[in-house]
Image (cartoon, rainbow, N blue to C red):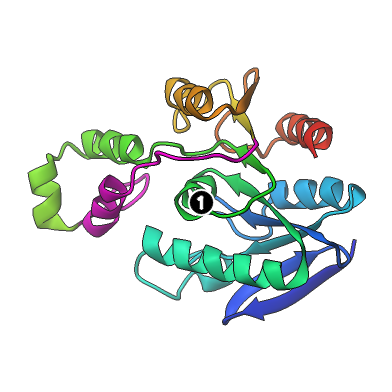
Amino acid sequence: MNLNKIRVNGIPVLIWGESSDRIIIAAHGSHSSKLDDCMWVLADEAIKHGYQVLSFDLPQHGERVYETDFLTPDECVRELMLMYGYAKEHAQRISLFGCSMGAYFQLLTFPEIDIERAWFLSPITDMKRIIHNLMGYCHITEEEFKKMVKVENDIEPLYYPYYQYVRKHPITNWPHETYILRGETDTLSEYSYVKHFSDCFGCELTEQKGGEHWFHTEPELDFFRLWIRDRL
């Protein structure tokens, strides 16, 4: 597989495959990177179908783990637009692949932009729900959260400006052809919320029986490979 490491506006980027008129912009999940296992599987299958794949490290991830104090949605939206600008310079048709929070940031970024199709793995379709769940886990009220600004815990830090952005930017529009895969036992990408999103926007939703949020075991990745292969 041809794999080129470049930088786009200083951001570490991997370009998988040969030049093509079709590029997939791939966004990883939390505690992951542009080299996640699912990126390898995606690229391996997508290249066979004539795609090139662009993956990059979000702030606080991969090569950028020490770059900033906290990841914020507006910064991720800005960087996804930088990736889109690069992709448009090199290809005619742009598609998306998003995993977990990476899918959420793509939902924020591309509702009104020309996208051919999207594939989401364990997507977070309602970030406010995730934050409310974490607030409950930390036993804090919204007023307490506002005063504390940042709340450390053993799952994922909470940051009040992040929460404010999420509240002000609900996902109300998604017109693109979209395919979603989630694990049956995923407690982050909850079934009722993903199903509601799928029903609202006409997405195809597939579940892997016994699968979890993080697709990393051999059976999970094999299932993902067959799923993405049939939908490219």
Disc 1: CA contacts within 10 A as few (<14), some (14-19) or many (>=20): few
As displayed, is residue 199 above or below residue 43? above
Classify residue 2 by image quadrant: bottom right
Q: Residue at x 48, y 55 (%)?
A: 109
Q: Residue at x 69, y 59 (%)?
A: 35
As displayed, is residue 67 above or below residue 31? below
Q: Which residue is mark 1?
A: 112
Quarter of the rendering occupied by the C terminus: top right
Magenta region: which residues? 150-177
Q: Residue at x 62, y 32 (%)?
A: 180
Q: Position of residue 121 (x, y in %)?
A: 61, 38
Is 22 on the left or on the right of 33, as rendered? right
Is 203 on the left or on the right of 65, as rendered? right
Q: Residue at x 54, y 66 (%)?
A: 81
Residue placed most toward the observer, 157 or 180 = 180
Residue farthest along the bottom direction in this orientation: 10
Residue placed most toward the observer, 220 or 24 = 24
Amino acid at pointer 1 = Glu
As displayed, is residue 184 above or below residue 46? above
Task: State yes or no: residue 207 in magenta.
Answer: no
As displayed, is residue 149 above or below residue 181? below
Task: State yes or no: residue 171 in magenta.
Answer: yes
Is 23 on the left or on the right of 81, as rendered? right
**Residue 72 in sight here:** no
Q: Position of residue 75 (x, y in %)?
A: 41, 66
**Residue 203 in sight here:** yes
